[in-house]
Image (cartoon, rainbow, N blue to C red):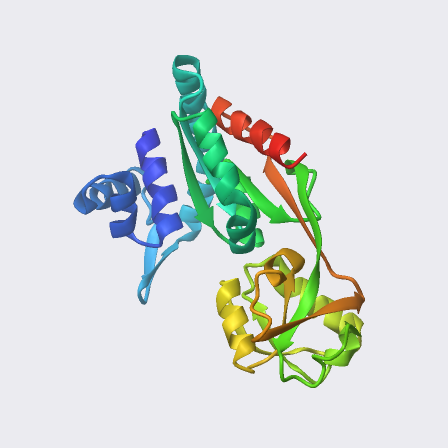
């Protein structure tokens, strides 16, 4: 067994595919399949089983991956630190951004960062907040933007944005004439929400339950602009942050303030408390903190 075998296993699980793992690792698919077979022969047990079109770890595979993760984190950290020692402000950063934060706040920040650090390659990846937490925690992303509150036991962080959610609805909606409303006013409405990899999904449902009703969720999406279009078409009501609401066409969408309760939309930049943080990632964190001060 060598470190490459563990890297192969991690990538296969991440991609749910031998072929996609091979592409990501820039090796031939037969090479990765042969390596897994050799590892299975060495360990005397199968590591993967197929379930339909998916690949699943066996119990032995789960044990191997559990022990492999900290080893690979150390290995990745070793390479990153050696690279930093040689190249200082060169390298790359993997950053996770929720779609709304990426569209609203980061294009200009990224441009200024790359003007200051032209040799640092930045990879922006759009996920929901819950997925970003998972990927930063595993080391797949260096830093990410998530919805507060932040688990301070796992992540270091600093605040970026302090806003609240507003309700959006078609201009023809009976509640569109109100200046403010309570969540209970929406008890009979159809809801359009972000998908469940977004922290807002569970948060809005939880607040509706506190207000005494179960929301009738008819559509879910990972894209705020699609949510806006479905709302404008009269398919339901939704909630978006104030920054996004200011960009909506007033002839299609009515924005109404939600005052009872106020649902905050507060973003933070996070990175792992433990593990190596590259100089490039440190430069990004310091730069973003400066921009949002």
Is 249 left or right of 210, judged from the image as shown? left
| Residue 273 can be seen in this image | no
Name which residue lies at 48% across and 37% down.
110
Q: Quadrant of the C terminus?
A: top right
Position in image of residue 214 (x %, y %) = 70, 78
Q: Between 24 and 42, which is closer to the camera in this rendering? A: 24
Considering every residue shown, the one lying at the far right of the view is 260
The image shows a total of numbered marks equal to 0
- Residue at x 72% of width, y 81% of height: 175
Which of the pair 193/257 is nearer the observer?
Answer: 257
Residue 117 vs residue 91, the one in the foreground: 117
Give the residue displayed 78% in from the left and 77% down from the top. 184
Position of residue 91 relative to residue 208, above or below, is above
Q: Residue 155: give x, y in percent of width and height.
A: 64, 37
On screen, residue 184 versus residue 200, left or right, reads right
Q: Does residue 46 appear in this view?
A: yes
Q: Is residue 86 left or right of residue 215?
A: left
Looking at the picture, how far across and down is residue 19, in whole percent? 24, 51
Q: Quadrant of the N terminus?
A: top left
Residue at the extreme top of the image, as rendered: 86
- Residue 166 screen position, x and y as percent: 69, 65
Residue 38, picture quadrant: top left
* Residue drawn at point x = 50 percent, y = 73 percent: 229
Vertical arrangement, residue 59 with respect to residue 94, above or below = below
**Outermost residue to the front:** 251
Q: Tell which of 135 and 221 is nearer to you.
A: 221
């Amino acid at each position: 067994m060598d470190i490459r075998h563990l890297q192969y296993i991690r990538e296969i699980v991440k991609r749910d595919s031998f072929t996609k793992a091979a592409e990501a690792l820039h090796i031939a698919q037969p090479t990765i399949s042969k390596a897994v077979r050799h590892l299975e022969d060495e360990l005397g047990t199968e590591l993967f089983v197929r379930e339909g079109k998916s690949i699943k770890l066996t119990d032995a595979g789960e044990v191997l991956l559990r022990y492999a993760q900290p080893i690979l984190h150390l290995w990745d950290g070793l390479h990153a630190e050696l690279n930093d020692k040689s190249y200082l402000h060169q390298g790359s950063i993997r950053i996770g951004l929720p779609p709304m934060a990426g569209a609203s706040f980061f294009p200009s920040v990224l441009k200024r960062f790359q003007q200051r650090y032209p040799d640092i390659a930045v990879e922006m990846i759009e996920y929901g907040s819950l997925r970003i937490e998972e990927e930063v925690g595993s080391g797949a992303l260096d830093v990410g933007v998530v919805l507060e509150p932040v688990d301070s036991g796992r992540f270091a962080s600093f605040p970026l944005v302090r806003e609240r959610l507003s309700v959006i609805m078609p201009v023809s909606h009976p509640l569109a004439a109100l200046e403010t409303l309570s969540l209970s006013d929406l008890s009979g409405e159809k809801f359009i929400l972000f998908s469940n990899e977004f922290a807002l999904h569970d948060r809005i449902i939880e607040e509706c339950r506190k207000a005494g009703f179960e929301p009738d969720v008819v559509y879910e999406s990972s894209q705020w602009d699609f949510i806006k279009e479905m709302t404008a078409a009269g398919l339901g009501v939704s909630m978006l942050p104030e920054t996004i609401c200011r960009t909506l066409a007033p002839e299609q969408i009515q924005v109404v303030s939600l005052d009872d309760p106020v649902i905050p939309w507060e973003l933070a930049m996070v990175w792992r408390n433990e593990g190596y943080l590259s100089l490039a990632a440190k430069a990004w964190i310091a730069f973003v903190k400066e921009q949002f001060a």
